[in-house]
Image (spheres, rainbow, N blue to C red):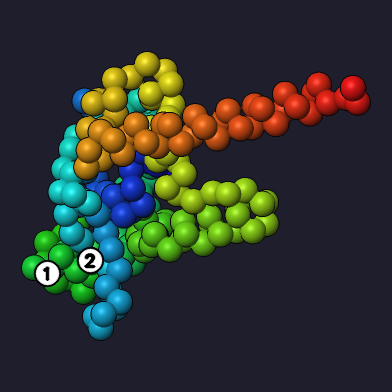
C-alpha cells in the first residue's frame, strides 16, 4: 500500500518490483516491469513492460526508504533461517514467474516470511473488503490518484508528476487532479449547506 501511496505505482508495478530495482543508498526505485496474470491458457503470472513503456526511476522519501530497508532485512533473516525451505523465484525466457528454477533468479519485494509470492489479487481482495465492509470507495489505484493530487496540491510541477507516475500525457495527470478537486468542492459544499441549513 505504501508503494501506491508514496510512489504512485500501478498495482502491477508494485507487485512486479524486485530488490534490484530498489536503491536504498540513493533512495530511488526503478520501475522496469509490471506483473500480469495470463488467463488465456498458461494461467500464470508473467512480467511485461510497464504500461505505455513508462520505464522510470523515482525518488522515495526517508520513511519509505527505512520501511523497505527493514523489510529487506526481515526477508534476509528468514532466508538464512529457512535455508532450502525458503521459496526462491525465477523469471524464464518468456517472462513467466516460477519457482521451478527456470531462467534467471529474481528477488521480488512482495513475499511472505517463507518466500512465497504475494499476488496482486491479495490487494484486490483487501480493496473489496474495505469497500464492502467499511463502505469506503477504495482500490489500490485510489492511492495512485491520491499521490498525484497531493503532489500537485503541494505545488509540484505537472510535468514532474506526469513523469513520476508514468502517465502517457500530461492531460491525464491534470485530469485526475481536476476530478479530485471537483469532488472536494462538492464535499465542501455539502458540509457548508449542512452547517448553515436553517428554515428561512
Residue at horizontal 30%, vertical 77%?
39
Determine crowd level at label 1: few under 14, some 14-19, many 20+ residues with C-alpha closer than 10 A. Answer: few
Position of 105 relative to 164 (above/below): below
Farthest-out residue, top? 155
Residue 54 lies in quadrant: top left
Return the disc, 2 or 1, that comes first in the chain's sequence.
2
- Residue 19 appearing in the image: yes
- Residue 70 appearing in the image: no
Which of these two is toward me, 42 or 148?
Answer: 148
* Residue at the spot of label 1: 94
Residue at horizontal 51%, vertical 62%?
125
- Report how far apart the C-alphas of labels 2 and 1 lie in the structure: 8 Å
Residue 98 placement (x, y as % from top left): 23, 70
Residue 130 placement (x, y as % from top left): 60, 53
Residue 129 placement (x, y as % from top left): 60, 58
Which of these two is toward me, 46 or 118?
Answer: 46
Amino acid at each position: 500500500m505504501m508503494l501506491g501511496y508514496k510512489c504512485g505505482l500501478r498495482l502491477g508495478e508494485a507487485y512486479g518490483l524486485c530488490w534490484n530495482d530498489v536503491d536504498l543508498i540513493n533512495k530511488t526505485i526503478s520501475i522496469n516491469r509490471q506483473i500480469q496474470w495470463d488467463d488465456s491458457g498458461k494461467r500464470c503470472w508473467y512480467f511485461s513492460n510497464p504500461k505505455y513503456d513508462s520505464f522510470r526511476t523515482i525518488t522515495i522519501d526517508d520513511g519509505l526508504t527505512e520501511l523497505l530497508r527493514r523489510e529487506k532485512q526481515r526477508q534476509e533473516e528468514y532466508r538464512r533461517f529457512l535455508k532450502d525451505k525458503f521459496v526462491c523465484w525465477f523469471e524464464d525466457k518468456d517472462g513467466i514467474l516460477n519457482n521451478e528454477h527456470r531462467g534467471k533468479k529474481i528477488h521480488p519485494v512482495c513475499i511472505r516470511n517463507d518466500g512465497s509470492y504475494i499476488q496482486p489479487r491479495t490487494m484486490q481482495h483487501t480493496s473489496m473488503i474495505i469497500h464492502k465492509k467499511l463502505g469506503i470507495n477504495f482500490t489500490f489505484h485510489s492511492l495512485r490518484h491520491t499521490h498525484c493530487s497531493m503532489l500537485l496540491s503541494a505545488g509540484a510541477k505537472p510535468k514532474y508528476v506526469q513523469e513520476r507516475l508514468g502517465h502517457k500525457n500530461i492531460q491525464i495527470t491534470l485530469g485526475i487532479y481536476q476530478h479530485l478537486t471537483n469532488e472536494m468542492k462538492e464535499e465542501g459544499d455539502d458540509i457548508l449547506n449542512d452547517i448553515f441549513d436553517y428554515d428561512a
